[in-house]
Amino acid sequence: MFDYRLKVFDTVARRLSFTKAAEELCITQPAVTKHVKELEKQFRLRLFERTGNRIALTQGGLMVLKHTSILRDISRQLEYEISLLHESRRGTLNLGASTTLAQYVLPPLLARFHGIYRDVQLHMLNANTEQIEQALLRKEIELGIIEGDSKRREINYTPFARDEIVLVGSTKNPLTKKDEIRPDELLSIPLLLREPGSGTLEVVTHALKNTGIKLSDLSVEMYLGSSEAIKSYLMHSHCMAFISQHAVINEIENGSLKIISIKKLSIHRQFLFITLHADDGGLPGVFKWFAVQNYRDVLLASH
Amino acid sequence: MFDYRLKVFDTVARRLSFTKAAEELCITQPAVTKHVKELEKQFRLRLFERTGNRIALTQGGLMVLKHTSILRDISRQLEYEISLLHESRRGTLNLGASTTLAQYVLPPLLARFHGIYRDVQLHMLNANTEQIEQALLRKEIELGIIEGDSKRREINYTPFARDEIVLVGSTKNPLTKKDEIRPDELLSIPLLLREPGSGTLEVVTHALKNTGIKLSDLSVEMYLGSSEAIKSYLMHSHCMAFISQHAVINEIENGSLKIISIKKLSIHRQFLFITLHADDGGLPGVFKWFAVQNYRDVLLASH
DNA sequence: TATCCGCAATCACTTTTTATGATTGGCCCA
DNA sequence: TGGGCCAATCATAAAAAGTGATTGCGGATA
């Protein structure tokens, strides 16, 4: 809503990475570079200190960030108030969400939403990313919530949170004695993975490739079609598995599963809202605004 | 600095005219129409009520305007703070201004500016619009202040005030008995005009053309090269003249000259800052910010 | 009541901006 | 000293913004 270049700057300044910002904005890294460079030229003010492959905000950049933060907040408030005008505190909202989100992330959020917007009737479709997008295009739903990073021109993507895929195993599993392993140690561990074609497997594959590990190098014991199946299997085996942190929060807390971190490897993905361009605002807009405002609180509160 | 479409909306909302906003923004009216229409589509919210050839803000538009006002203020503040970073409270600022501005509008503004920024050395070049632009391009000045509406790609135009060209005559002149005349009555009045090529004559010609009067229809007694010459001549003749309101404020107040309005005709032009794109910010930026903040106060205070 | 006239809307077309994919080059770490 | 990560660069493709000419509607004029 506010000047796109400033939005790009704001994102880079928060992530302190051109590449990460590009992902979050759903554009490429060269585009981000160019926008920032143009801002710097326009202001005649270096916004980032580039030391090697790391960047840091300059003093001027910090000052600009203060302003863009405010601009961002006001823009959000504007979007929200616009959505309020769409007689939108009642009616029906058809949602579609991919599995992890629908099972682990959305329920507490939906509950709180319903607590406030009692006259909004929520309908939830549960399917994979591809199917959610199709449903959106067919107008069976007005708002989708998905993981990953597809990109269709006719769909409007709004990132709202990040997810981390973690390596977990049963606490009964001797492999979980350590807190951290090296990437190469991974090769000898029997693994459970989500099925080919799933967003989870895709992002795991991609991240591993960056450390030089191919999928075929791993000792994959089994591909399973749901997080619940994986968790259940883990309890009865010496396998470990890559799985969304949100899917295992409870098990981590009660001590039945444990996260093992991997040196120099972290696997992230985004949660995105998707809408048809024509359909942004209204009830979907209200929900999006609500989710952005509340998801942190909700996730912290529910555990 | 903030999203261009919102800026367009903000301008239209303040002027309540697409055409006027287009002038102020230095773009064409169809462009303004398009931007507003796209905003309305995006928000799915009618921003203006179009009743005939008049427009009014809708309730939603009013709400949006509140937000864009804030956004505009913050954006200005950001620009200002950026310009402050350019070690800009001292140094030399070379200004160029066209005649009317240099004589009547700028002096009180410059005085106040100097009162606050005592370590800034001001240099003022006085020339016509064309020459000011040339001086800017040759980097003899960093900031120009001109009337009218030329448009070069390599120059950055920032409107900061409006001027009105009025018809005036000596109070001794029987023609000034009336307060208002019809356009056709103009044809029989002996007139003084600024010289061909001047911005003043150009905007007068253009405005008259819209009421169907050609320059050649008028009884022009003389073309004079300065406002002072015109005022002086007026005192000793039965002529009337088109002249900037700023040039005659004192004479109007002390009763020696009188403004006669013309039915259905008002002649406006803008005062603009011009800078090289590369040179925006810094001292020019500080001065621009200062001028926008203060010119109303200053003009009111000095009369 | 017919006729201007001012103003926003529309249209076909041009220019400018923005985004992309592929590649380069510098720095860090092993 | 070599591999990998990350920002910068470049040529090119896609999209957006702007323009000039024109249309069409409503309000004011005579």
Image (tube, coloured by chain):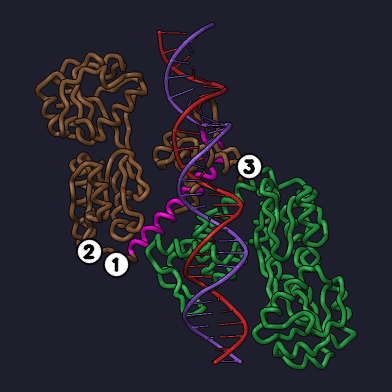
Chain colours: A green, B brown, C purple, D red
Label 3: chain letter: B
Q: Which picture quadrant has residue B195?
A: top left
Query: Residue A229, position in %: x, y?
Result: 88, 75
User: What residue is pinned by disc 1?
Assistant: B87
Instruction: Tell me the magenta residue range.
Output: B56-84
A139 part of magenta stretch: no
Q: Residue at x 56, y 39 (%)?
A: B37
Give me the residue at 83% from left, 60% from top: A126
Q: Is there any visible trace of residue A286 in the rendered image?
A: no
Mark 1 vs 3, N-terminal side: 3
The residue that mark 3 highlights is B44
* Label placed on residue B91: 2
Inspect the image, locate mark 3, and give the three-letter code of the amino acid beneath it: Arg
Task: Please tell me how crowded label 3 is: few (under 14), some (14-19), or many (20+) other residues with Cα within 10 Å.
Answer: some
Mark 1 and mark 3: Cα distance apart in space: 45 Å
Q: Amino acid at mark 2?
A: Gly
- Pinpoint the chain carrying mark 2: B
Front-most of residues B57 and B240: B240
User: At numbered mark 1, what does the secondary structure look like: helix, strand or loop?
Assistant: loop
